[in-house]
Amino acid sequence: MTTTDKPPRILVADDDMGVIAAYRYVLQECEADRHLGRQAGSGLEQELFGDGDDAPDEDTSWRVHFVDQGDDAVAAVRKAVAERDPFTAVFLDISMPPGIDGYEAAEEIRKIDPLVHIVFVSAYSGYDEEDLLDVAGPPHRVSILPKPVWPLDLKAKAIAICRDARRWRASRDAVRRSLAALRDAR
């Protein structure tokens, strides 16, 4: 399986283990429910609707990695880029003592990976929106979610970011195939 065939990767960085547990519940329960639902309902579903398409729901198919400090987030992004399996999105808490905060982490992450979508998630940051956009921009690759975040809003944000990434990868791959065909035709 190539990197473009793999589900998108999401990195979550928050120093509060309760918040990490909530992210885990919201982002990983999608995958678990999808597999359990297909398994538990497969006999009834087949009886009622016949043989359906068992392809996974691409909207909620992703791989999630969790860290509890800004330095760890930067290291995870660096490693992912080096392994040529970068994160599609990074959900960053802004206040993560005792190390670097989400603002500083975003600045480093953007230097490492200019394509990753950075989502700032915080109740209070001490930074205004312009500061966050300046350090983590461009604006189309930055989002801000205020805490508390509703589970559906979190899931919707992850779905939207991953869907956009899938479309971008598909377009990029189509251009690469076209360029290869043109080279081969010469």
Image (tube, grey):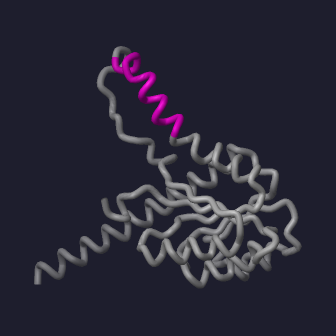
* Residue found farthest to the front: 98
Specify whether residue 33 is painted magenta: yes
- Whole-percent x and y of residue 180? 21, 77
* Extent of the magenta region: 32-46
Q: Is residue 143 above or below residue 139?
A: above
Specify whether residue 39 is painted magenta: yes
In what quadrant of the picture does the C terminus appear?
A: bottom left
In what quadrant of the picture does the N terminus appear?
A: bottom left
- Whole-percent x and y of residue 71? 68, 75
Q: Is residue 88 above or below residue 77?
A: above
> Dividing the picture into quarters, in which one does residue 95 lie?
bottom right
Q: Which of the pair 41/13 is nearer the observer?
A: 13
- Whole-percent x and y of residue 154? 67, 51
Count of number-bearing discs: 0
> Dividing the picture into quarters, in which one does residue 53 lie?
top left
Picture residue at 61% right of the left edge, 80% below the top: 110
- Whole-percent x and y of residue 85? 44, 68
Classify residue 179 as left or right of residue 29: left
> Dividing the picture into quarters, in which one does residue 67 lie?
bottom right
Classify residue 81 as left or right of residue 27: left
Picture residue at 64% right of the left edge, 71% below the top: 72
Q: Is residue 172 above or below residue 55?
A: below
Picture residue at 31% right of the left edge, 20% below the top: 50
Q: Which of the pair 87/80 is nearer the observer?
A: 80
Picture residue at 85% right of the left edge, 69% below the top: 125
Chief secondary structure of the magenta portion: helix
